[in-house]
Image (tube, rainbow, N blue to C red):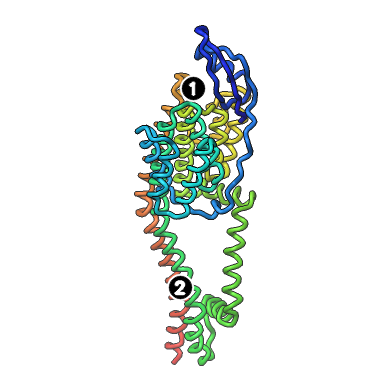
Amino acid sequence: MPKFSYSAKNSEGNVKKGAMNATEKKEVIESLKKEGFWVTSLEISKSKKVKTDFFGGFTSVPLKSKMIFSRHLGVMISSGLSLSRALNILGSQEKNKGFQKIIFSIADEVKKGVSLADAMKKYPKIFDNVFTSMIGVGEVGGNLEEILKLLSDQMEKDHKLLSKVKGALIYPSVIITLMIVIGILMMIFVVPKITAIFKDFDAELPVLTRVVLGTSDFMAAHVFLVLGSIVAIVVFVIFFYKTNLGKKLFHKFFIKAPSVGKIVVQLNSARFSRILSSLLKSGVSLVEALRITSDTLGNYYFKTATKQASEDVQKGINLSKVLKKYDNIFPYLLIQMIEVGEETGKTPEILLELANFYEDEVDQVTQNLSSVIEPILMIVIGTAVGFFAIAIIQPIYSLVDTI
C-alpha cells in the first residue's frame, strides 16, 4: 500500500503535515475531511528501499523475547524516554547477543532519523510484516506506546496458544517415533536370530511368518540401503511439503483429519481474528490488514482465502460476504459475527471476542486430546505387538508339536 505525504489546513488556518498509508488519494482526502482539514498538497512519498541485514537472517529470537522487548519499550516511551535511549537501555539488558546487536543497530538507525518501522524492516526474520506495519501506523498516529502494548499482548496470546498445541502433540509424536525406531531395530538385529532357529527345522512356516522373516532378512542384509531409503523418504517429504502442491495436499489433510482438523481450524481462526483485530485497532485499513494477516496464517487454504478476501474487499464487497465463499474452512460462527460487526461498526471488538473464544476452544481441545490419543496409541501398539507375536510365536508352537 502506498504512503501519501500531505499538507492540509482547517478553517482556523492551522496547518497539518504528515504521511498516511492509503490505497488511493481519495481515501486520504476523506480521512482528513472528517478531521476538519482540507488538503492543500498531496503526493506519494518516495521512500528509500530498506536493505535487509544479511547477518540478521541467522539470528533466532524467541517469541517470548520479542514480547518482553515490545512491552518494555512501550513502558519506557510512555514514561517520557526518547526512543533511541529506550532502545539502548533494552539492548544493554538483552541476554541474547544476536538480538542485542540488532537492538543497538536499530537504535543507531533511529538516531540518524530513520523511522523505527523502517529500521526494523531490515530484520524481516525477527520483525514480521504485522509487527512493522503496526509500528509504522503507531509512529504516524502518535500512539506508538499503545501499539507496542497491543503487539506484546498479541504475542503473549500467540505464545500461550502455540505452546499448548505443541505440548499436546509432543507425547504422541515421541511414542510413534520410538515405536518405529524399535520396530526397525528388531527387524534388523533381533528377528534374524530367531530365524536361525526355524532354519534348523524343515517345516512349513505360516505365510505371515514367512513375510516377516523375508522382510527381516532383506533389512539385515541391506542395512545401509534401508537406513538410506528412510532418510531419503524423510528428506523428500520435507522438501515436498514446502512445494505448493505439497502444502495443498498436507494442509487439506490437516483440516479434514479427525481431532487434529478441529485444532487446525480453530487455531487459524483465532490467529486470523486476533491479528486482524489488532491491525484494525491500530488504524490499518481493512484491505491492507487482510493482506498482512494472510502472510501470518500457517494453513495454505486460510492464507489463500484471506489474501483473496483482501482483493474482493478492495472492490467494495463486505468481508462477511467474501468469507461465505470459504465456509468450508472458516467457521459459520466467525462469518456471522463479522457480519454483525459490519452492521454495528464494531468489527475490531467482535474479532477480539472471536479470538478469545477460539483460543479457549483450542485450550479445551488440547486438554482433551491426550485422553483421546492415549487409547488410539494403545490400540496401535497392541496391534503391532500382536502382529509380531502371532508371526513369531505361532510357528514355535507348531514346531514343538512336531517334536
* Residue 52 in the image: above or below residue 196: above
The answer to whether residue 229 shows anywhere in this view is: yes
**Residue at figure coordinates x 47%, y 19% from the top left:** 343
Sequence-first disc among 2 and 1: 2
Q: Which residue is mark 2?
A: 182
> On the picture, is 319 further left or further right than 84?
right
> On the picture, is 392 further left or further right than 291?
left
Q: Which residue is mark 1?
A: 342
Q: Amino acid at mark 1?
A: Glu
The quarter of the picture where residue 371 lies is bottom left
The answer to whether residue 356 shows anywhere in this view is: no
* Residue 390 in the image: above or below residue 78: below
Q: Relative to the observer, which residue lies in front, 354 or 371?
A: 354
Instruction: Judge the density around disc 2: few (<14), some (14-19), many (≥20) Cα neighbours within 10 Å.
Output: few
The quarter of the picture where residue 400 lies is bottom left
Looking at the figure, which quarter contains the N terminus? Answer: top right
**Residue at figure coordinates x 53%, y 17% from the top left:** 16
